[in-house]
Image (cartoon, rainbow, N blue to C red):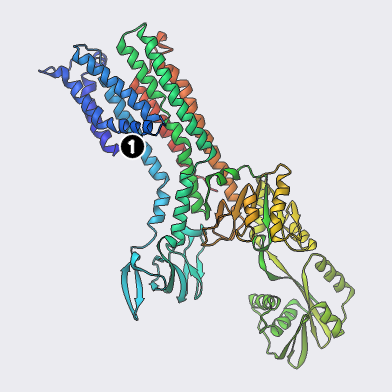
């Protein structure tokens, strides 16, 4: 809209300027004269005013109706005053009109709005891209036949066929086939994710080189992608504290502009011609338009929210992202956040003349058919090391102690220290010291005994994730402290905290007591971010200054968290804080530019330096105002290039 109006107004402005006194004087020429040529500037300026300028007048009406006068009110007041005055002078037979100033002012304002809309549209294009991720049609298998149907015709329970390279049309579960899927648009993770039977898939993600049959579980507004778009839209529409401040500043700047314009008009009427006085007033009203101020925060907010979604974390509340920059300490729930929440082999201690592989192979062979978590961890480690399991027979579980079986005719026992004592096997002094050290660290030690002789011991623990080490390191480098809360015993908590370099930990904490630990940290004057799963940690997430739900996957409906991490990756915590700081910096830069420009420009427009021959014409004022708006928009868009 603004582009067309600008081009039309520009073409009509050229003859208006050509017939103006200032152009003819400067260029030393005489514009062609013909019957009625004296009314040509009035005619063309009227078309520009009603065609190009009406959009500002209509917007001003809406501002005044809402009792929120702003930029459009100032522009409308300026162009209406210039037009009505020039119309009166023309009808009265005078020649001191402001038609060329009016025409160029409206034209430049339209250009500024067009450039601004292009910047805003570019800033929000990533959100539009989300809506284009879904295919228009999908292949559905019905009655044994494949048919192509519109997306809106798909129902929950349908089986859809996704060919290699195709887009997955709905959320669902794989029922047949396997493939590597690109989920980067949903999680921000660039690596392909292997999907097999029973795995969940997300609408809009891209299938790899395998064909998949998927049972539809969610459609339309229920899908993860729809939820992301809804959250992004809500976050963009919600206001941060800085935005509320800029809105108030824009309102008061409008009042100041009107008052200053009135004072300027009255002052110059006392010492100069009416045309000059009105010209000064128009320049003041135009230069003071709080457009840059009004755009400074919302555009940055829009870009940062979209950028967050692209990086795998969803901002539910603008205030949550704004709060992240001030966080002093991040409190992690241990299990499932810093650790994998499952047993893993920490260390293998072979007895004399026995290697690790032999110990693990015997233990895994005995437990190959057991469903106990510790047994499964031992078998999983053996498979990871590509160890062939030995044939076993006579398996029996020893309640509360372990298990035993026959391997190559030898009795092999795998279990606790109680089973070790009952077997009669003896530990060396060196092995006893090593096992004691591991036990003090809170690790579970399992013994492997063959024919009542010690083969070795296996230490298991809740495995610390490598991502956690990097996450803690990144936060430390950013000057943010870390703390951990867990229901585990003191020795386990101390070992994990020591391994990761966590500043403070709380052990033996029940789920309903986690919020008390948040309050404890807050009582020290610290701003606390709580990281949990969004379910068991809901009270603590709500109590914290910033609640972050980690590992939410496709669940975007967690109410207790201000920010939701799609991936189960604690390294994204540092990204949140980094984006918050970048966003705040951009907002402050924009506010400084928008307000600083007005402080300098308004006195110039009012004519305080007129005695020295320095005057700011309304058209030039419009150029400066538009440039300030475009500068703010460009500065905001640069945030898209920033790496977090």
Which residue, as the protein is rendered here, is positioned at the far bottom?
409
Q: Is residue 441 left or right of residue 618?
A: right
User: Whole-percent x and y of residue 151?
Assistant: 35, 65
**Residue 388 vs residue 200, the one in the foreground:** 200
Q: Quadrant of the N terminus?
A: top left
Name above or below for residue 26 compared with residue 578.
above
User: Whole-percent x and y of residue 275?
Assistant: 30, 13
Bin the neighbour count of mark 1 within 10 Å (Cα to Cα): few under 14, some 14-19, many 20 and up.
some
Q: Is residue 630 left or right of residue 188?
A: left
User: Whole-percent x and y of residue 570?
Assistant: 62, 56
Q: Which residue is mark 1?
A: 114
Q: Residue at x 39, y 73 (%)?
A: 158
Q: Residue at x 55, y 39 (%)?
A: 584
Q: Is residue 98 visible?
A: no
Q: Quadrant of residue 63?
A: top left
Name above or below for residue 487 compared with residue 453.
above
Q: Is residue 644 visible?
A: yes
Q: Residue at x 65, y 61 (%)?
A: 466
User: Whole-percent x and y of residue 106?
Assistant: 30, 28
Secondary structure beneath label 1:
helix
**Residue 406 vs residue 265, the one in the foreground:** 265
**Residue 517 vs residue 22, the one in the foreground:** 517
Name above or below for residue 151 compared with residue 526.
below
């Amino acid at each position: 809209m603004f582009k067309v109006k600008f081009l039309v107004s520009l073409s009509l402005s050229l003859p208006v300027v050509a017939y103006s006194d200032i152009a003819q004087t400067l260029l030393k020429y005489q514009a062609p004269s013909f019957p009625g040529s004296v009314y040509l500037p009035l005619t063309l300026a009227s078309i520009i005013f009603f065609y190009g300028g009406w959009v500002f007048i209509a917007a001003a009406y809406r501002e005044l109706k809402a009792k929120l006068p702003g930029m459009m009110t100032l522009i409308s007041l300026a162009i209406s005053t210039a037009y009505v005055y020039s119309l009166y002078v023309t009808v009265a037979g005078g020649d001191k009109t402001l038609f060329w100033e009016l025409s160029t002012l409206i034209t430049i304002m339209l250009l500024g709005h067009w450039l601004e809309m292009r910047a805003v549209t570019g800033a929000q294009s990533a959100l539009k891209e989300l809506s284009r991720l879904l295919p228009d049609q999908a292949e559905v298998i019905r009655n044994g036949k494949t048919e192509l149907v519109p997306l809106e015709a798909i129902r929950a329970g349908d089986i859809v066929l996704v060919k290699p390279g195709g887009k997955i049309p709905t959320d669902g579960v794989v029922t047949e086939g396997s493939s590597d899927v690109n989920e980067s648009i949903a999680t921000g993770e660039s690596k392909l994710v292997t999907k097999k039977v029973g795995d969940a898939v997300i609408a809009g993600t891209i299938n790899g080189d395998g064909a998949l049959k998927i049972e539809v579980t969610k459609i339309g507004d229920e899908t993860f992608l729809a939820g992301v778009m809804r959250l992004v839209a809500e976050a963009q529409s919600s206001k941060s504290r800085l935005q509320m401040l800029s809105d108030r500043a824009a309102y008061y700047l409008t009042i100041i502009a009107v008052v200053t314009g009135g004072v300027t008009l009255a002052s110059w009427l006392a010492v100069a011609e009416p045309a000059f006085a009105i010209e000064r007033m128009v320049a003041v009203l135009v230069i003071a338009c709080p457009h840059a101020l009004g755009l400074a925060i919302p555009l940055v907010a829009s870009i940062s929210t979209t950028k967050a979604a692209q990086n795998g974390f969803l901002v539910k509340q603008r205030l949550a992202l704004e709060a992240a920059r001030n966080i002093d300490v991040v409190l992690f729930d241990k299990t499932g956040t810093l650790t994998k929440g499952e047993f893993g082999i920490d260390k293998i201690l072979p007895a004399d003349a026995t290697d690790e592989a032999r110990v693990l192979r015997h233990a895994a062979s005995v437990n190959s058919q057991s469903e106990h978590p510790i047994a499964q961890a031992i078998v999983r480690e053996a498979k990871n090391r590509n160890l062939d399991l030995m044939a076993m027979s006579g398996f029996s579980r020893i309640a509360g102690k372990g298990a035993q079986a026959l391997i190559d005719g030898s009795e092999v026992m795998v279990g606790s220290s109680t089973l070790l004592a009952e077997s009669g096997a003896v530990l060396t002094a060196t092995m006893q010291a090593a096992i004691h050290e591991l036990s003090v660290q809170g690790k579970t030690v399992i013994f492997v005994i063959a024919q009542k002789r010690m083969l070795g011991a296996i230490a298991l623990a809740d495995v610390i994730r490598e991502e956690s080490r990097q996450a803690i390191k990144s936060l430390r480098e950013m000057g943010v402290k870390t703390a951990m809360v867990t229901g585990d015993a003191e020795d386990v908590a101390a070992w994990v905290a020591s391994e990761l370099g966590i500043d403070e930990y709380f052990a033996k904490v029940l789920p309903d007591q986690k919020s008390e630990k948040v309050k404890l940290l807050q009582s020290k004057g610290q701003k606390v971010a709580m990281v949990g799963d969004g379910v068991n940690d809901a009270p603590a997430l709500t109590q914290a200054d910033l609640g972050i739900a980690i590992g939410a996957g496709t669940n975007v409906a967690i109410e207790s968290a201000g920010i939701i991490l799609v991936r189960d990756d604690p390294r994204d915590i540092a990204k949140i804080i980094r984006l918050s700081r970048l966003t705040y910096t951009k907002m402050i830069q924009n506010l400084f530019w928008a307000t600083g420009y007005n402080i300098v420009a308004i006195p110039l427009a009012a004519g305080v330096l007129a005695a020295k021959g320095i005057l700011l014409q309304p058209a030039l004022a419009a150029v400066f105002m538009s440039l300030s708006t475009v500068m703010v928009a460009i500065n905001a868009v640069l945030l898209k290039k920033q790496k977090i």
